[in-house]
Amino acid sequence: MNLRTTYEHLKRIATFFARSVLKPKVVQIHNKKIIMDYRGWSPEMIKIFFWDNYELEERTIVPAILRPGDRVLEIGSPVGFIGMLASDIVGTENVFMVEANPELIKAARRNLELNNVSAHLIHGAVVPNASTESIPFHIHENFWSSSLGQKDGTKQTLDVTALPLPDLIERHQPNVLIIDIEGAEYDLLTQLSFPEIDKICVEVHARYIGDEKISALIRHLILDGFDLVQSISTGDNLY
């Protein structure tokens, strides 16, 4: 490690231990203030925030791909963090954030207010088509694992409004999609074409859908006219 890297490493350790002891009501993550929920969040989630590791990959990708004039539809917004980063670049009027978990809609709204961000928050689960008015959504003990697919750790299942993606695109006119929906990305992206969209950032989840479906998802998008930009993609987040 060089001196700067060593300093940053020690700084992160000190920040983690200070937060662990003080348990602040608000932590700052990449210049955004996030209200902590010590009762509602698991110890694993709290630790991620204390280490300043929340959405590390997306923090790199979002500033790299967005430009003023873009309109962003974020599908899976949890606490509003990525939508707030996007708002810094494209303006709050051009960011539309969709979240299915009703408790997280409340959390995101509080965080937006705390950071003086007025991006649009929409409650519901995004689906490929209008075949149903509502759909079961499974809330996980770790909020970032909540999804349309049930898995170990699910603590509650709710019926939420189903929001067809073509309707959202027609209504809000985005040219950018940012998607993190814990395995539901395969069904959402492989059943549609996206002539209106210029850029897609999607987190893929091999542990839920497997490598074969991820390959099929990538293949579908390439056949739809997109290029996979490996120089910006990082980890499970593909651009």
Image: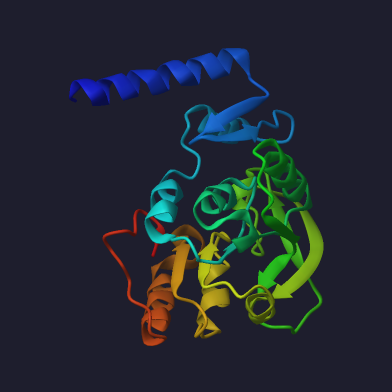
At horizontal 32% and vertical 58% (from top left) the residue drawn is 232
Using residue 178 as the reference point, say whether residue 137 is left or right of it.
right
At horizontal 56% and vertical 18% (from top left) the residue drawn is 20
Using residue 75 as the reference point, say whether residue 207 is left or right of it.
left
Using residue 114 as the reference point, say whether residue 14 is left or right of it.
left
**Above or below — where is 180 with respect to 57?**
below
The answer to which quarter of the image holds residue 214 is bottom left
Considering depth in this image, is 48 or 194 the residue closer to the camera? 194
The answer to which quarter of the image holds residue 198 is bottom left
At horizontal 60% and vertical 62% (from top left) the residue drawn is 94
Considering depth in this image, is 64 or 18 the residue closer to the camera? 64
The answer to which quarter of the image holds residue 233 is bottom left
- Residue 201 rendering spot, x and y as whole percentages: 45, 64
- Residue 93 rendering spot, x and y as whole percentages: 64, 59
Considering depth in this image, is 78 or 85 the residue closer to the camera? 85
- Residue 61 rendering spot, x and y as whole percentages: 40, 54
At horizontal 47% and vertical 64% (from top left) the residue drawn is 202
**Marker count (numbered):** 0
- Can you say which quadrant of the picture contains the N terminus? top left
Judging from the image, the colouring scheme is rainbow
- Can you say which quadrant of the picture contains the C terminus? bottom left
- Residue 121 rendering spot, x and y as whole percentages: 72, 57
- Considering every residue shown, the one lying at the far left of the view is 2
Considering depth in this image, is 203 or 152 the residue closer to the camera? 203
